[in-house]
Amino acid sequence: DKQVYTGSTTFGSGTEVSPGEFVIYEGTSNGSWLYGLEPSTEYHIAVFEYNGTGEETYYLKDPYMAANKETLSAPSVQSNNAFTSSRSNTSINISWTRGDGANRILIGRKEGPVNTTPIDLTTYQSSSSFGSRQIGTGNYVLYSGSGNNVNVTNLEPSTNYYFSLYEFNGSSAKLYLNPGYQFALETFGERPTIQASNASYANINFNSFEVDFDKGNGTRGWHSPERGGLSMPDQRILPPMEQTVSLVKGTKSDPAIL
């Protein structure tokens, strides 16, 4: 009684009434924000009613309201198992398995691994259009949210892109799980305009022979050894090859135009 205390919503700045115990609020309201707290830490609160001012201040000391609450922790399980459900020469649709955080952030970089990490207590704006929201040098925040999918656009053809996923908890003050889950994907190239030509044969045996040809202007190819006829490749994505070679047994048929 008869004691005036100064409160501060920043923990440690108000009147210290006992070692490690600080007045965090003094007034007529029924709630307050608290700042300056540490992650993964339990805090105990005691609330005392009082009347009067100055030396005429009288507190209700028994009973008083007691409560405790722990601040958020960073996640412990990172996002993983990233895969692409579709892609083109300028976009990649990426999905992943979520970790145990409330949210996650995806960072991407062209032609090299992501070389930055998100900083705790920092909020980053995101855009699925590559090149819009830079973090560090050449790294871009492509997604931030609670989901498990994003379609990344504004990419370059035949280009390797590197990505890193980070789980996080918190809204205004975020805690990120580091290091991130890293992976890389490549966009498709443009359709070639010059076909392979001038096939020649050598080392012909009863069960094998060597075939050579002049390459076109494609960077990759497709092959399909077949018996009984020649068919053209469809437009599905298949393992990279230097060129397309089809072997047939019997009569050659004219391929359909793609």
Image (cartoon, helix red, strand yellow):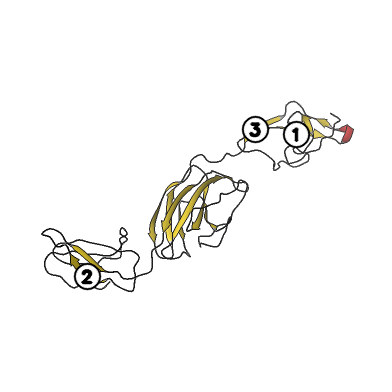
Choose the circle earlier in sequence order: 1 or 3.
1
* Residue 58 sits above or below residue 77 on the image: above
Instruction: Depth check: give the residue in front, 112 or 56.
Output: 112
Amino acid under disc 1:
Phe
Amino acid under disc 2:
Ala
Q: From the image, which quarter does the N terminus lie in? A: top right
Q: From the image, which quarter does the C terminus lie in? A: bottom left
Instruction: Depth check: give the residue in front, 147 or 68.
Output: 147
Residue receiving disc 3? 68
Choose the circle earlier in sequence order: 1 or 2.
1
Residue receiving disc 1? 22
Can you tell which mark lies on residue 191? none
Q: How many marks?
A: 3
* Residue drawn at 62 percent across, 49 percent down: 122
Q: Residue 116: x, y in percent? A: 56, 51
* Residue 22 sits above or below residue 132 on the image: above
Gap between marks 1 and 3 measured at Cα: 15 Å
Q: Is residue 251 left or right of residue 1?
A: left
Can you tell which mark lies on residue 199? 2
Q: Residue 47: x, y in percent? A: 73, 33
Label 2, residues with CA under 10 Å away: few <14, some 14-19, many ≥20: few
Q: Nearer the viewer, mark 1 or mark 2?
A: 2
Q: Residue 119: x, y in percent? A: 60, 48
* Residue 109 sits above or below residue 180 on the image: below
Q: Residue furthest right?
A: 55
Gap between marks 2 and 3 measured at Cα: 80 Å
Q: Nearer the viewer, mark 1 or mark 3?
A: 1
Amino acid under disc 3:
Asn
Q: Secondary structure at mark 3?
A: strand
Q: Is residue 249 left or right of residue 57?
A: left
Gap between marks 1 and 2 measured at Cα: 86 Å
Q: Secondary structure at mark 2?
A: strand
